[in-house]
Amino acid sequence: MNNEEGKSEIEKLNETLYSRTRYEEVKDERHQVKPARPDGRTGGEFDTSNVRETWQSPALDEVLKGEREVPQTNAFMKKVFVFAVLFFIATIIVAGFVFLGGANFISSKNVEVAVLGPSIVSAGEVLELGINIANKNNADLELANLSIQYPPGSRNPSNTAEALTFSKEELGAINAGAEASRNVRAVLLGSIGETKEFKFSVEYRVKGSNATFYKDKLFEVVIGNAPVTVSAESPEFVTSGEEFETEVSVVLNSPDILRDVVLKAEYPYGYAVSLSQPAAILDNNIWMLGDLSPGDKKTVKIRGRLSGQNEEERTFRFYVGVSGGGASRNLKIALASILNTVAISRPAIGLNISFNGEDVSSYVAPAARSISTSIRFQNNLPDKLLNPRLEVRLSGAALDKSTITAFNGGFYDSLNSKIVWQLTNSLGVQELAPGDASQINFNFSSLPKEVLTSSNSDISLNFTLSGTPVGSSNQISVSESRTVKIASQINLASKVLRSIGPFTNRGPMPPKVETETTCTVILSVGNTQGDIVQANVTARLGPGVKWIGAASAASEDISYNAVSNTVTWDLGTLSSGSGFSSTGREVAFQIGLTPSTSQIGTVPVLVSGITFIGQDTETGLEVRATNPPLSTRLTSDPSFIQGDDIVVK
C-alpha cells in the first residue's frame, strides 16, 4: 500500500511545505469553500474528525513561547529616566517663574519709567517733564543711562535757535528698591493740534553679566496754541492788472524769545510781486523777521498785480515759523498760517498796453529802435462814458522826443512831453457806449547808443483814461504805468593789419602759393550801458590759416583751440561805458596764411564767425553781436594796395 494512503489532506500539505525535494506544480483548480456533506448536500459545518494536530511540533512551540516572553527592564536605567523627566519639568517651572513672575530675579518688568508733565502745551513755551526711574528688582542696576529722543521741532529753552534731537545722561547705579529722577526742559514748535512724541530709554546692566538691557517709555504732547499770530490785510476787491498792497503782521504771544522767525508767502496764479518792504531774501516770498521778544510785532508790505477774469477769487497763504538755524534761510517749522482771499473785479474802463505786440510791465528794447505802442480800451460800465480822454506822459533821459509819432488823432505836446486823444466812437461822437472798445497807436524810440549811459537807460510811460458816466457829475479814471529799458549795446570791431600794429609781420603781399604771409588781427569791444557778465568773443580761423600766438594785452584772457581752429577771448565782465565813457577792451593776435594752389586768384578768408555773447545784468537778457569775416583785403592797413589781396602763383 502506498505510504500516501491513509494520510489526511493537512498531513500531505504539511509534508509538501516542509519538504526540500517534493514540489508539485500549482494546479489551477477551484473547489468549494466547504466540502460536501456525506449526504451530498452543501453547507453546514466541516467534518473535522480526520484533522490531526500533529503539525504543531515541539520546535514550533518553543519559537512561539519565546515571542510571548516580555524582556526584563534594567532598574538603574529606569531610575535615570525618571530623574531626567523630573529635572526637565522642574527646569520648565523655574524658567516660567523667572520670565513670567520675576519676583525674585532681574526683570525689565520690574523697572518702571514714569513721565510727569502736561499733555497739552503751547508752541514756543517751555515744557517741563519729570522722569522717575524705579528699580523694583531685588538686585541693583549698574551703569544705568537715560536716553531721550526728542520730537521734531524741539528747541533748547536757553537758545531756541538750537535744535534738540537726542540726549543721553548717566544715572549711575540704581539700588534694589531705589529710584532715580531727572527733569527735562524743551521748547516745542509746531502747528496747533500737532502731536509730539518723546521716547525715553533706560539702559542698564546687572552684576555678573555683560548684557545690556533696555526699558522704553513713550510720552505724547499735543500743541495747544501757537506762540505767534499772523494776520493779512488787503483790498477785498481788486481790479485785474491793477497794483495793490497786502500787509502781513506777525505778533509774538509767547513769554519767551522766539529766534530766527520766518514769514513765507504762497501766491495764487496770476499774481506778480513788484515791490516788498522789507525786501524778501529769497524768491520774492520769504522774509527773515529775526528774533521776536514777547509782544513784538513785525509787518511786511507786499505790492503786486493780480491778473484774472471778472469775479474770480484768488487765495494767498502766509506761513510763520522758524528757520533751520545757521545758514538756513528757508522755513523749516511752521507755527501758524492764514488764508487771504481777494476777488477780482473788472475795471470800469479796461486799459491794455503792449509794446511791439508784448503786454509786459517792463519792456526791453535796443537803442534807437522804433517801438510801436498799442493801447486798447473798453467801457465796462453799464452806462455811457461821456467825454473820454486818454493821456500818455513820456519821460526819461533816454527818450528821443523827436521820434514820438501819434496816430488816430492824437496830439503830441512836446513842451509837456505828453500825447492826448479825445476819444470818439465809430460815429465820431465823444462818448463810449457800454462795451464799446477800440485801439490807438503811437511810436517812439530812445537816443542812439553812443549817447546813452547806465544812468539814463530807462523810459517811463504813464497812461490815464478818464471820462464821466451818464447821470453822474463825478469823473472816473484808470491809470497804468510802464517802463521801457534800453538794452546794452555792444560795439564789436575787428580788423586785419600788416604794416602797423604790435607785431612785425613777414611774407609776400600779395600772398603767394605755398609761402607763409603773417598778419595781425585786432578785436575791440565797447559797451554803452549796464554791466555785461559772462562776456566772450569767439572767432574761427580760415582754411590754410594757422595761429602764431602772442596776444598784445597781458591782462586779457585769449586762447586758441587747435581742434576747432577757434580763437576765444574771455572778457569776464564788460563794464558799463567801456569804450565810451572809459577805455575800451582790445586784444591782438598774429596769424599766418599759407595759400594753396586751389586759392590762386581768390581772396582768402582769414577769420570768420566773429561773435560776441554776454548777459545784461540790468535786463537779464543775452546780448549778442557779430562782425563780417576778415580777408586778405586789408582795407584798414595804410600800406594796402588794391590787388594785393589776391593770391598769386
Image (cartoon, rainbow, N blue to C red):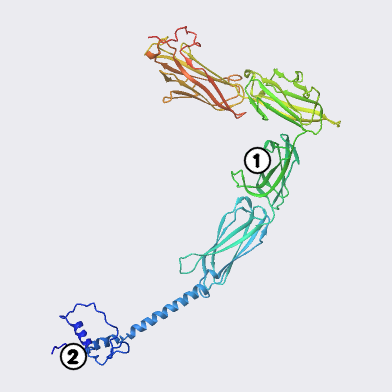
Q: Nearer the viewer, residue 539 or 322?
A: 539
Query: Mark 2–mark 1 contact, CB under 8 Å?
Result: no
In the visual, does 419 lie left or right of 34?
Answer: right
Q: Nearer the viewer, residue 448 or 175?
A: 448
- State the SS at label 1: loop
- Earlier sequence position, callout 2 versus callout 1: 2
* Residue 575: quarter of image: top right
Q: Quadrant of the N terminus?
A: bottom left
Disc 1 marks which amino acid? Asn
In the visual, does 202 lie left or right of 499?
Answer: right
In the visual, does 86 lie left or right of 385?
Answer: left
Disc ID at residue 6:
2
In three-dimensional space, the C-alpha distance between marks 2 and 1, rounded to whole angstroms, equals 129 Å
Disc ID at residue 585:
none
Please say if 524 is above or below 192. Answer: above
Please say if 394 is above or below 227. Answer: above
Residue 165 at x, y = what percent? 57, 54
Q: Is residue 288 visible?
A: no
- State the SS at label 2: loop
**Disc number lying in front (2 or 1):** 2
* Residue 7: quarter of image: bottom left
Residue 543 at x, y = what percent? 42, 18
Residue sitting farthest toward the front: 40
Disc 2 marks which amino acid? Gly
Q: Quadrant of the C terminus?
A: top left
Please say if 493 is above or below 27. Answer: above
Disc ID at residue 285:
1
